[in-house]
Image: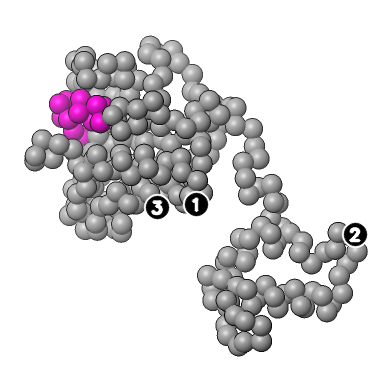
Amino acid sequence: TPFAERSGSQPSDALVAAEATRIFERGAGLAQGAEARLQASAVLALLLDVSQNGWVDPTHAQVHQPMDKPLSAYYIRSSHNTFLTGNQIYSDSSADMYRRALTMGVRCVEIDIFDSPDGGLEVYHKFSATTRVPFRSVLEAISETAFTKCGRASKYPVILSLECHASLEGQERMASELAEVFGERLHRPGGGDSWQLETPQSLHGKVVVKGKRCPAASSRPSSALGSFGSSIDFDSDEESDTEGQAE
């Protein structure tokens, strides 16, 4: 702890009191001797500060577990309806929410995709009054922050959980935009029914796409999808109408 000396001997009461006062004043943002109350946010910051709390193992502030097991062996920090700034009924949709989630350490984000009236693709929550954001803007926001050094982002893979409600033509455009925006960072697993999940270590710096295969699309090969088509399963209707209305 910050109170213990390197020799292992116990500090005096005066030393403990002085150190506690210093930590309090730093958390409150005060000069020595000033009077104020420590805000709840400052208390939380102190509790989560590994340099000030012996109960937090400093090695846990960074990756300390083996990362060579299949993805299914790990708990992955995930975000539901990542695009929403508020509730699921009438809040705004924003690409910035993906930047926020990724820099906070989220590694699996959700994208609900629909055809837009202008022939493109847009993201919003089904059966709701939420606003809409272009699919391309979402991909660009993810590309900018997926592997940045800002916040708690890392080099480990980012998983895109696609809830796809787009038409077959929309799915072709979606595949093209994924390939255009992410390029070589887009993970393209081998085809076939027999495959094994890769590891976080082997997927360093990669974007992994997750979803369910649309039966109609699987029977219609597309040159736009190319080798990409066999590796991505698009969820054509993850939520039933009843579920969507209930949300």
Residue denoted by label 3: 100
Residue denoted by label 2: 7
**Labels 1 and 3 touching (C-beta < 8 A):** no
Q: Is residue 32 above or below residue 244?
A: below
Q: Earlier in the sequence, mark 1 or mark 2?
A: 2
Q: Position of residue 230 (x, y in %)?
A: 32, 17
Q: Is residue 25 above or below residue 96?
A: below
User: Where does the magenta region start and end?
Assistant: 165-177
Real-space CA distance between mark 1 and mark 2, rounded to the nearest whole angstrom: 35 Å
Real-space CA distance between mark 3 and mark 2, rounded to the nearest whole angstrom: 43 Å
Q: What is the crowding at mark 2: few (fewer than 14 residues within 10 Å), some, or many (at least 20)?
A: few
Residue at 69% x, 55% y is 56
Q: Tell whether position 166 is magenta.
A: yes
Please identify the dominant SS of the magenta region.
helix
Q: Earlier in the sequence, mark 1 or mark 3?
A: 3
Residue 100 visible from this viewpoint: yes
Q: Position of residue 123 (x, y in %)?
A: 23, 43
Residue type marked 3: Arg
Residue at 66% x, 87% y is 33
Residue 151 is labelled as 1
- Indicate the secondary structure of the residue bearing disc 1: loop
* Residue nearer the viewer, 33 or 122: 33
Q: Position of residue 218 (x, y in %)?
A: 24, 17
